Amino acid sequence: MATTTASLEGTVLEAAAHLYVWALKDIPQDLRDALRAARERETSVVGIRVLETIRRNVEIADEQRNLVCQDTGIAVFYCRVGEHFPLHPVGIQRALEAGTERATVEHPLRSNTVHALTRVHTGANVGYRVPIVHWQFVPGWDGLDVKCVPKGSGSENMSFLKMLVPADGVNGIKRFVLESIVEAGGKPCPPGIVGIGIGGSADYALHLAKEAIARPIGTRNPDPLVAELEDELYGLLNETGIGPMGLGGDVTVLQCHIEHADTHMTLNPVAVNYQCWAARRASAHIAPDGTVDYDREA
Ligand code: SF4
C-alpha cells in the first residue's frame, strides 16, 4: 500500500510516543559506560556510594522496565527534515505533540506542563509551545531524523547565560563556566554533562548549550580549538570537588560539550545548560516510505 501523508503522520506520532517512553527507561550505552568509568575513578567513599546507587537505580529500571527517574521532564525534540521528506513540518509538529500526549496518557507518565503564570496544568505533557521542537532542514535529502531529549527540571533550573564582552576572551568564558557549575553544586543531580554554547546571540547561545548536552557523551566538537577547550574545561570542572550529588568527590561532570557559532564583533555570549546523570535521549530515523529505524546511540 502506498504511503500517504496521513499514514506518515501516524508513523511519526507512533515514533514520538515510543521515543519519549524509551528515552525515559533505557539510557544510552555511552552514558552507561561513562557512569561505570566514573565509579571506577571516584575515590571518595560518599561519592562511590552515590555512584553505586545510580548503578543500582539503572539496573532496577532495566529489570522492571521502568523509568530511570520520576521526573519525566519536558519533551524536547530535535528534527532534521530532508527537503524531499513527504510530510510537511506542520504535520510533523502535530505528530510530535500527539505522540507526546499519547505516551503520557497510555504509559501513563507523570505530566508536568503548566501555564507559565497561572501554573494551571495544561495537559498530558503538552501545552502552548510544548513539547519544544527544534528544526534543521537538509537540502537534497528525503528522510527525517527525530531525537527526543526529555529534560528534567532539576538540571534545567541550573542554566546560565552571560553576555561577556570580547575583552573577557576565552579566560572569561572559562571563569563563567566554572562559577556557574560551582553555584549549581548538587542541585542538577551530578555527575552529568555540562553543555556550553558560545557565540551567536543571547538566545542562540542557550540553544547551542542545549544542543551540546544532547550529543553522545565524549564526542568532540569538529573544530580542534573548541575541542581543546572541551578537554580543558572537563578537567577543570572535575577539580571543583563538588562530586556526585554535590557530596564531594573526584567526579563532578561526566563530560563537557561545547557548541559554538560565529558572532557579532562586539558580542561574546556564553551559556551553560546542565544535563543530570540521567542524560536521557533516543532517536529514530524515518524513511519516506514510513520505515522507522530506532537508534538509542545517536
Ligand atoms: S535533575 Fe535529572 S536525575 Fe535529578 S530529578 Fe531531575 S531528571 Fe531526575
Image: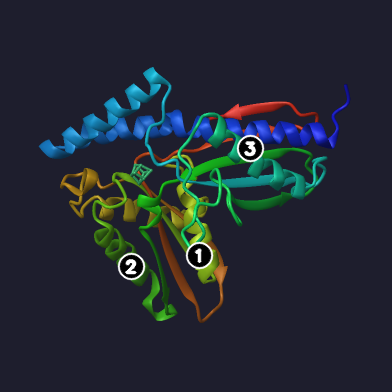
Could you say which quadrant of the image residue 106 lies in? top right
Q: Position of residue 262 (x, y in %)?
A: 56, 68
Q: Residue at x 80, y 31 (%)?
A: 7
Q: Residue at x 46, y 59 (%)?
A: 119
Is residue 194 among the parts visible in the rendering?
A: no
Numbered badge on residue 278: none
Q: Looking at the image, is mark 3 or mark 2 nearer the viewer?
A: 3
Which secondary structure lies at badge 2? Answer: helix
Q: Residue 205 shows which numbered tag?
A: 1
Distance between mark 1 and mark 2 Cα atoms? 14 Å
Number of the front mark, 3 or 1: 3
**Quarter of the displayed picture in which ligand 1 can be seen:** top left
Label number found at residue 176: 2
Quadrant of the snapshot with the N terminus: top right
Q: CA distance from mark 3 to mark 2?
A: 38 Å
What amino acid type is highlighted by mark number 1? Ala
Query: If you read the primary sequence from the N terminus, does the residue marked by circle 3 or circle 1 appear first?
Result: 3
Figure check: 276 above or below 287:
below
Does the beta carbon of the residue at mark 1 sit less than 8 Å from ligand 1? no
Q: Residues within 10 Å of mark 1 (few under 14, many from 20)?
A: many
Q: Is residue 166 above or below residue 15?
A: below
User: Mark 2: which amino acid?
Assistant: Phe
Tell me if the residue at label 3 has its CB under 8 Å from ligand 1: no
Q: Earlier in the sequence, mark 1 or mark 2?
A: 2
Label 2 Cα neighbours within 10 Å, binned few <14 / some 14-19 / many ≥20: some
In the depicted view, which residue is nearer to us: 290 or 199?
290
**Pointers 3 and 1 in contact (C-beta within 8 Å):** no
Pointer 3 residue:
99
Quadrant including the C terminus: top right
In which image quadrant can residue 84 be found?
top right
Residue type pointed to by label 3: Gly
